[in-house]
Structures are given as C-alpha cells and as structure tokens.
Amino acid sequence: MNYSKEKIYLFAYSRETLVRKFPVLAKRLKRYFNDDDFITWFKIRKFIKKYKLCAEFPDIAKQLSRQFNLFDNLRFILANCFVGVAGFYADKLDTFYLRKRLGNIERIDFKDKDIYISVDSVQENNLRLHSCSKEPFTVEWIKKTAHKGVFYDIGANVGAYSLIAASLMGDSGSVVSFEPAYFNFYKLNENIRINKLNEKIIALNLALTDKNSLLNFSFSNIESGSAQDSKNEVIYRTFVAAMTLDNAIDYYHLPFPEHIKIDIDNGELELLVGGQETFANSEIKTVMIEIDESEGSLKAAKVYEYFLSLGFKLNEKFRLPLSKVARFNILFTK
C-alpha cells in the first residue's frame, strides 16, 4: 500500500469530472496533502470535516471514505510504530481485509503453514478445504521431497497442493500450475493472491495433451472446486487451449520440472505421449499420478509400462481414501 500523496492524486485526477466540475475542491486536495505527507484515514476524515464535504459534496465524501479506509491507517501504524512485528501483523491485516472484500475465506487443513482459500461452493467446502485429509500421502510427498526445486501441478484445480508446495519452498523454488477449467482457474488465481504467492506460482489456463490444438472440453460440473467425471451427464461444453507438455515448456520458457503431480481425471495417456521428452529427461526426480485401476481398466497398465520404460521405479502406491472406485496415487522415482 502506498501512503504518499500519489494515492490522493490517483483518486482525484483519475476522475476527470472531479477536476472539471469541482476545480476548487481539486485544488484543496492538492494543497491539503503535501509531498512528504502520509495519507491516513484520520486525516481524510479531518479533510472531509474541515471543508464540509458531507454537506457540499456528499458523493465525493463517500468515495473518499471508501478509498482511504481504516485498514489503511492501521497498516500504516503497524508498519511504522511496531517494526519488530510489523510484517506479521500487516499480513494478518491484509488477510482480514481480503476476507472483507472477497467473502468467505477459510484455512485449509495443513498444519505446517497458514494457507487460505476462497470458499464459494460445496466442493470447495467439502473437498478442497480438507485436501490434506483427502490425500495425506500427497502432502507428505510434497513436504519431504516435491517442494525442493521446481514443482509442476498438472490439474491444479483451485490450487491447494500448489499452495502447500509454494509455501514450503526456498528462494530458488517455483511452482507451475496447469488448470484448464475456467471456473477453477479463476479461483486458483484468487487463492494465489490471498496467500501472496504470486512470486512463487505460475498459473496457466491450459490443458496438456498429445497435440497443440483447441479442445472441445466437456464439463459435468461447473462449480469451483469440482472435478470432472466422464460417467456423469455433460452440462456445458467450451473450447480450451491445449498443448503438449514438451511444447508448453519450450514455448513459455518454463523452469524445467523436478517433481510432477498429475491429477486430470481423464486423458492421462495423451498427456504422457505429449511429454515424452520431458519425462525422459534425467532432471525429473519424482512423478505422482492419479489413475483408475477399476476392473478392466487398461489405462493403469499402460501408465506403468510408460514410466518403467523411461527408467522410473514404482516407489509407493496409495489408494484414495474417499474414492468410491479403485483410484490410486502412484509415486514413480528415478
């Protein structure tokens, strides 16, 4: 937050009608706040009272009060009077301010760090808030290994595991989150913003498959936090940009991954074909992929064959505790 007079100028002069219709008021604003001044909520209130804005310019008085609120002043006091704890309390205050602006923000069930997500749907409340309980082995893998270096989250949904990995990383680490569903991608970015991890996470609204194209994507649920089930009725279709993993890395100049999490509910084999060069690279250390091993499924066998042929070893296999079918997270290591 900038507390110099630039903020008052931004308020006053970004509204052409204020300067044109109320030149006297514009001059008062400029004169009242000097170059070395810090703009605080209390000073704004004093300005409004001094020039009787509530009576003379009621709409502008309301705009000023909204633009420069009590949160600004409290943050200013914390940052200047309590230097030792300013960072901690400023972050808490920012989170509180975001709660006020964005609505329902809740802490996920990750014990090691305070991580928050915006919750607007049943799926977010029932599943995404409880991502650690839903997949405890995934979280343990991220904590022990996958947060070291560059982590790819393919099928990031609203970003719970991306946020966990980013929160544990040092200065050199980064996360690349791929999410094709527009409603989940929006919430992924909101959650990155809430947790101030925009310097750590690169979010891409992109499907990864075996060719560069536009995919006609089918959705069985368009609530934020939802995953797609091919067995359910399609309620919405839209085109989604798609690339191979190999081409996406080259085209966007992405940092090369060391650890990859794959949870896309469908199209796993196409993704692997489009990432042949990437997965064959010796820099890849671990891959965790969620697959369906229901009776008669050939996909699982092909996934095993693919990774073993590239020199990976089957490290661990975990059944998803909340899944009604035989869905497993498989951890492959080199």
Image (cartoon, grey):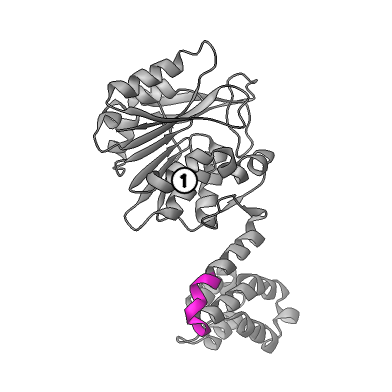
> According to the image, label 1 marks what residue?
162
Which residue reaches farthest front?
Answer: 316
The quadrant in which residue 300 appears is top left
Tell me if 55 is positioned left or right of 99 in this view.
right
Majority secondary structure in the magenta region? helix
- Against 331, residue 191 (above or below) is below
- Against 65, residue 106 (above or below) is above
Give x and y (percent) for residue 265.
52, 26
Judge the density around disc 1: few (<14), some (14-19), many (≥20) Cα neighbours within 10 Å.
many
Give x and y (percent) for residue 35.
45, 85
Q: Where are the magenta residues, as a range?
A: 80-90
- Residue at (50, 86) in percent of width and height: 37
Question: In this figure, what is the number of numbered marks?
Answer: 1
Q: Is residue 240 visible?
A: yes
Quadrant location of the C terminus? top left
Q: Is residue 211 visible?
A: no
- Against 330, residue 293 (above or below) is above
> Which is nearer the eye, 240 or 180?
180
- Magenta span contains residue 213: no
- Residue at (28, 42) in percent of width and height: 253
Give x and y (percent) for residue 14.
53, 68
Q: Say what amino acid the circle numbered 1 marks.
A: Ser
The quadrant in which residue 45 appears is bottom right
The quadrant in which residue 76 appears is bottom right
- Magenta span contains residue 81: yes
> Which is nearer the eye, 235 or 270?
270
Assign a secondary structure to mark 1: helix
Which residue reaches farthest left?
Answer: 282
